[in-house]
Image (tube, helix red, strand yellow):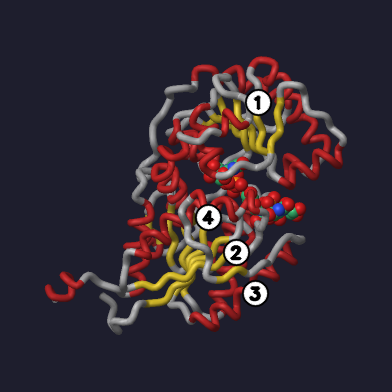
Amino acid sequence: MNPTNNPVPIVVLAGARPNFMKVAPLMEAFAADSDISAVLVHAGQHYDYSLSGQFFSDLNLAAPDFFLGAGSGSHAQQTAEVMKRFEPVLDQVQPAAVVVVGDVNSTLAGALTAAKLGIRVVHAEAGLRSFDRAMPEEINRVATDAISDLLLVSEESGRANLLRENVAAGRICFTGNLMVDSLRRHLQRAMKSDVRERLSMAGERYGLVTLHRPANVDDQSQLARILEALSAISEELPLHWPMHPRTRTRMAQSGLALPEKLFAVEPLGYLDFLCLEANCAAVLTDSGGVQEESTVLGVPCLTLRENTERPATIEHGTNRLAGTRTETILRAWEESRGDRGKKRIPPLWDGNAAARCHQAIREMLGIVQAAELQAR
Ligand code: UD1
Ligand code: UDP
């Protein structure tokens, strides 16, 4: 029950592929709450059907109330475009809070726009730190957290990092991992996908690759070093690679050829990707979300990076930092052979993160249970 008896308007912002799995369970929780009226805004940072529309369908996520169509551009252009287009929506909706998720440019743009209008900002997946400021996402994380009023943390490291940065403990809430909520909700459906038949790989033992970090794919010699390692691994285990458009462009520009047993396909929908991920022998990735999902699925994961902002996936899960040089990747590959079955699920990666986020947001908004009111 809220003090005015009118539903409190809030805005939830998503912009790019990894955001959709995080907002879907949140929107579901808000939909069941008559005290809150949640408006979904899609910034349009990702716009191809294979990076955007497909996920609304796969996640049973209703179409956004507003589509900003910000599109691609330099960091400044993209961030500014989201801000310019988001501000009038906030003026129109007059929300009591804006919820942003993850670490993409849309996340920071949404947080900045809201904070400057004096609207409270809630950041889900707060506190993650790679401690690598060369990563655009790290700047987005640090800056978003600095102006957020409520910081919803997905793993224990998030709380420790925020406390170290002198964020007041009362603003931090350890809610668990929204990505895992979506995984648990949709895994059964995903397992029914016929993606392996469609890709002519039914019955095959295979590995799954995703790569899109600028540090790995924008630099031609770096991309070549990774390809050399993948090529050697693919001799032993055929590799399937749903290729991100950034990477596809860089591959085409570089003129590098794919080895025979490294199969590139278009980016996959969520259910198809989850099916391949759950059934593969190993994943090789630089994705944040894939590190988390493979931990929950118990699938060995080699992270082709020098660091991770998700240490719980190493501490508890199946993740292993493989570095980005040919020899470090191949060494990690050798060492990873015993990783299957080494599986502990990090605390609060239990499928109920959205319920805890929802409750924390209600409390921030001053909405209390009817039973609680009667007891007063
Ligand atoms: C963005 C995020 C990254 C996240 C990734 C998830 C930032 C700084 N980066 O990286 O954190 O891990 O999304 O996938 O926010 N493009 C298309 N179609 C689209 C969208 C983009 O072809 O629908 C192409 C465009 O050429 C664009 C390029 O991909 O220039 C990069 O897109 P962008 O959103 O800027 O960055 P990502 O690499 O996708
Ligand atoms: N994913 C997908 N299709 C693909 C590759 C990834 O559905 O072809 C999903 C994956 O299951 C995970 C999310 O995309 O839920 C991760 O997003 P991404 O790797 O783009 O971004 P990051 O997590 O690195 O920010």
Which callout, 2 or 4, points at the residue further toward the start of the chain?
4
Q: Is residue 228 above or below residue 358?
A: above
Residue at 86% of width from left, 38% of height from top? 254
Distance Cα–Cα, label 2 vs label 4: 22 Å
Residue at 64% of width from left, 60% of height from top? 105
In which quadrant will I find the N terminus?
A: bottom left
Which callout, 1 or 4, points at the residue further toward the start of the chain?
4
Q: Note whether residue 102 is visible.
A: yes
Mark 3 is surrounded, within 10 Å at the Cα level, by few (under 14), some (14 to 19) or many (20 or more) other residues, namely: some
Which callout, 1 or 3, points at the residue further toward the start of the chain?
3
> Which quadrant of the figure has residue 26?
bottom left
Please state which amino acid type lies under the numbered disc 2: Leu
> For residue 56, which numbered disc appears in the image?
4
The residue nearer to you, when weighing 366 against 15, is: 15
Distance Cα–Cα, label 3 vs label 4: 21 Å
Which callout, 2 or 1, points at the residue further toward the start of the chain?
2
> Which residue bears the numbered disc 1?
239
Mark 1 is surrounded, within 10 Å at the Cα level, by few (under 14), some (14 to 19) or many (20 or more) other residues, namely: many
Q: Viewed as shown, does residue 166 lie left or right of 111?
A: left
> Which residue bears the numbered disc 3?
85
